Amino acid sequence: MRDLVIVMGVAGSGKTTVGAGLAEAAGWPFVEADEFHPDANREKMASGTPLTDEDRAGWIGAITTHVAESQAPRMVLACSALTQFVQERLMRDSGRLCRFVWLDVPAADLRARMASRAGHFMPVSLLESQLAALDVPDGAVRMDALRPVSELVQRLQEALPAPDPA
């Protein structure tokens, strides 16, 4: 069965960096969930208003359609996947076995990371709502995302079973 490695966590946890690093090291396609947000979602978040599951519906639908259409045996998705709604849609609609990897970072470090990045639509003011919404799925692989990216990538490659070649 084809699978999907979902590198999840709140804003500033390093999803894109770790996910892209894992995909590059392993030769798997990489998908950045933020690229699928409609302008209305980006504007809402930029204004400091958290998204609702209703706001997320079209976004997650676009992601699952993209992932389901790919023939790659394994893909890596950088996606907050904070809520059960998003997690269940990924599992139900992606056509793949979903393997969640949670990047765990203390709140103070998240705030510092978010404050230091330029040009991102997600303001630091939304961090608390993201932490409140975070529902880590059972069986998720927890990674201490204060560790170096190269170490996280290596550990993930060792922790993940080989993809099904079929």
Image: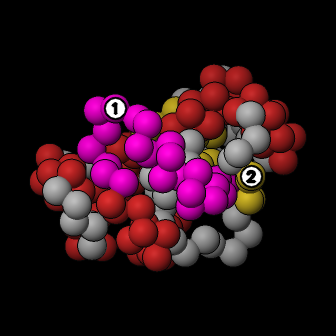
**Residue 118: numbered disc:** 1
Report if residue 117 is visible in the image.
Answer: yes
Q: Which residues are magenta?
A: 97-124
Report helix, strand or loop for mark 1.
loop
Compare residues 70 and 6 and report the one nearer the observer: 6
Image quarter in which the C terminus is found: top right
Report if residue 96 is visible in the image.
Answer: no
Q: Nearer the viewer, mark 2 or mark 1?
A: 1
Snapshot quadrant of residue 8: bottom right
Residue 44 position in % (x across, y down)? 17, 58
Residue labelled with disc 2? 144
The amino acid beneath tag 1 is Ala
Residue at (35%, 44%) from the top-left corner?
Answer: 34
**Residue 142: numbered disc:** none
Q: Are marks 2 and 1 in contact (CB under 8 Å)?
A: no
Image position of 8 (left or right of 38): right
Gap in angstroms between the C-alphas marked 2 and 1:
24 Å
The amino acid beneath tag 2 is Asp
Residue at (74%, 34%) from the top-left corner?
Answer: 148
Note whether 22 is above or below 52 in the view shown: above
Image position of 111 (left or right of 5): left
